[in-house]
Every structure is written in structure tokens, then in C-alpha cells.
Image (cartoon, helix red, strand yellow):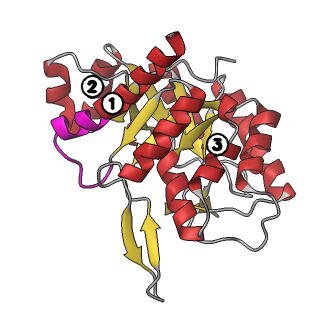
Amino acid sequence: MSDISTLPERAGVGFKPAHFRDILAAEQPIGFFEVHAENYMGAGGPPHAQLAALRERYALSIHGVGLSIGSMQPLDRDHLNRLKALCDRYAPESFSEHLAWSSHGGVYFNDLLPLPYTRQTLMRVVEHIDDVQTTLGRSMLLENPSTYLHLAESTIPEVEFLAEVSRRTGCGLLLDINNVFVSAKNHGTQPLSYLDAFPLDRVREIHLGGHNEESDDAGTSLLIDSHGSPVAGAVWTLYAHVIACLGPVATLIEWDNDVPDWPTLRAEAIAAEDILAGAARASAA
């Protein structure tokens, strides 16, 4: 089985076809690009032509959104086989998925839904990750979710749940710092406490993205993990704290909605690169 991740310890961005010409026009200050697996499960066409050209020049991370690893039902074998074919085709430096469920009874939902953290769900998630890693012939990364409510059935803190899944399966962890911030603010907890308890030794990639502030039916402020705006200042602060503790690690800027022009997205990546470079200098001193 291949290593958990061999992404460069640099900043990357999610690839958007609208940026393709700008990206190939000159060498970019980007360590890697990430794509959603489900957008490339067809046989060919422009998506694959663009991805192949990108792959010749940059490291690649494939990020799944449809495996439904947290579901109590068996994994979709057809979906998993298509994912294997994609990973075999492009040999990405990293593959990751979410601690969530998104399908039931053959119906796929356009959401990454939360699951209760119990011994039963722990065993099921471990079983699913073992299945994914065996099928793909590679280790994967598991991402912490953004959540908007507490499930009464949960008996295991989220950080402990993720740490135990990683310990039992050997998978790495993808730490989404915006998800940590969103969840903490929604639940009235402290994001820094969550991060300080997180098993940073298992982290192989970090995600940074934007969020929106809305109100629920009772008028209470609610943060939404929207990926449609710049990374918030508070999230940059948390990121700098994690990098100071962990050292440089592959870091992705996620921007999936209201996608800006290439210079704007590249500037977000350069901001992350500056923090990573500072940590590298500090460790070398």
C-alpha cells in the first residue's frame, strides 16, 4: 500500500476549468492542485484533457465527496471501482474523503451529513476505510466535518473519534481549519481547544476556505461552510498556530462557489505559502 500522502509541503488550490488558460500561461507559485473525484469519473473529454495537462506539471490531490464513508450501509462498489480507475489513471500524491454520509438506499444527497460518534459508527467507519484503502491499494486521508448541530446519540468526542479511526486503519487525517472554526462558533466552543487536542502527528494535509454568517429560524447567528469567499482572518490566525506547532504541511485553498479570477485565488495560496515558508525558516534556524 502506498504512503499516506506525498504532497509537497506547500500551498495548493482547487482546480477550476475557468482558470486553465491562466495556469498554463506561466509557471505558478503553487505546490499542487486538487480536484473532486466525482467530476472526473467519465471516460474522456475536455475535463480529462485539462487534468492530464495539469498533471504533467504539478502534484495532484484527489478529494472525494461521494463515498459516504459514514453511512451504515455498504459502500457503493460501482462508485468505489470508478474511484480506483481514476486514481490508477492519474496516480495522485494524495486521496482524501470526508467523515460524513451522503447516500442512503441508492439515493444521493447534495450534502455531507453528520453521523453520531458511537462505538457502532466507529466500527463501521473503520470497516469502510479499510475497504477503500484495500481497493485503491493506497492509504487515504479522512477530513473532519463542519457541523451545525449536536447528535444526542454521540458518546465519543470528535477528536477522539478521528484519532481512533486513524489508529485502527492507518489512514492519515486532513485537518480542515475552517470546518473547525465554523463548528466551534456554531456550538459555542473554542476552536483553539479543539486544535490543541487534535492528533497533529496524523495530519498530512490542511484545508482553508471561506464561510458565510447567516441566522437560523430563531435569529441565532449560524456560520455556513460555503467555500465562496476569502479565508477569514480568524481562520488564518488558527492556521498560523497549527503550522507553528506542526511545521510545514500541504495546504489547500478551497473556493468552490462564486469562484474569483485566477489572480485572486493565487493570492490566497501565496498567503498560505508565506506562513509555510516562515515555519520552514524557523525549523531550520
Q: Which residues are magenta?
A: 256-268
Tell me where residue 119 appears, x and y as whole percent: 86, 56
Q: Secondary structure at mark 1?
A: loop
User: What residue appears at the point 52 percent right and 38 percent down from the top-left corner?
Assistant: 241
Q: Which residue is mark 2?
A: 49
Is residue 233 shown left or right of residue 85?
Answer: left
Identified by mark 3, the residue type is Arg
Is residue 99 something one can see in this rendering?
no
Residue 262 within the segment the image draws in magenta: yes
Residue at the image position 50 percent from the left and 20 percent from the top: 93
What residue do we see at 53% from left, 49% from top? Answer: 66
Label 2 vs 3, first from the N-terminus: 2
Residue on which disc 1 sits: 44
- Of labels 2 and 1, earlier in sequence is 1
The quadrant of the picture occupied by the N terminus is: top right
Residue shown at 49% from the left, 21% from the top? 7
Amino acid residing under circle 1: Gly
Q: Nearer the viewer, residue 282 or 110?
A: 282
Q: Magenta stretch: residue 24 in it?
A: no
Q: Is residue 59 left or right of residue 176?
A: left
Which residue corresponds to mark 3? 77
| Dots 2, 1 in contact, CB < 8 A | yes
Name the disc covering residue 195, or none.
none
The CA span between labels 2 and 3 is: 26 Å
Identity, as a three-letter code, of the amino acid under mark 2: Ala
